[in-house]
Amino acid sequence: MTGYRIVVRGQVQGVGFRAFVYREATYVGLRGRVWNRSDGGVEIVAYAEGPSTLDSFVVRLQQRPGRIDSVEVDSHVGEPPSNFDIGPTH
């Protein structure tokens, strides 16, 4: 399973961005979590069977609520959770 750590910066808190991420992630079958960061960004850890699903997910993130200033994507290694959820602010 492939994992990505994604940090989205811009005007992404208070605009429904985490809910959008949750809907998109569950629609395409991702496993992981999204949460607000204390620095004003949103962080996502997502897992899929292959990188193409994750790459498409990253593209869709840039087309939705809020003003996106940057999207950082790194690989992430860990045990994928059984579902996708919205976590508390870190």
Image (cartoon, rainbow, N blue to C red):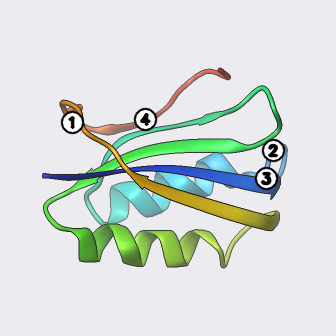
Q: Are marks 4 and 1 in contact (CB under 8 Å)?
A: no
Residue 67 falls in which quadrant of the image?
A: bottom right
The quadrant the C terminus occupies is top right
Where 2 sits versus 61, above or below?
A: above
Q: CA distance from mark 4 to mark 1?
A: 12 Å
Q: Amino acid at mark 2?
A: Gln
Circle 4 — which element?
strand
The local secondary structure at tag 3 comes to: loop
Q: Is residue 89 left or right of residue 39?
A: left
Pointers 2 and 1 in contact (CB under 8 A)? Answer: no
Q: Is 1 on the left or on the right of 5, as rendered?
A: left
The part of the image, by quadrant, that contains residue 56 is: bottom left
Mark nearer the N terminus (2 vs 4): 2
Please tell me whether residue 30 is drawn above or below residue 56 in the rendered image.
above
Q: Position of residue 70 (x, y in %)?
A: 73, 64
Dot 2, how many residues are within 10 Å of its Cα: few (below 14), some (14-19), or many (20+)?
some
In the image, residue 76 lies at what x, y percent? Answer: 33, 44
First-in-chain label (2 vs 1): 2
**Residue type marked 1:** Pro
The residue wearing badge 1 is 80
- Picture disc at residue 85: 4
Tag 3–tag 2 contact (CB < 8 Å):
yes
Give the residue displayed 28% in from the left and 72% down from the top.
53
Callout 1 touching callout 3 (CB < 8 Å): no
Which residue has dot 3 on it? 12
Label disc, if present, on residue 13 of the rendered structure: 2
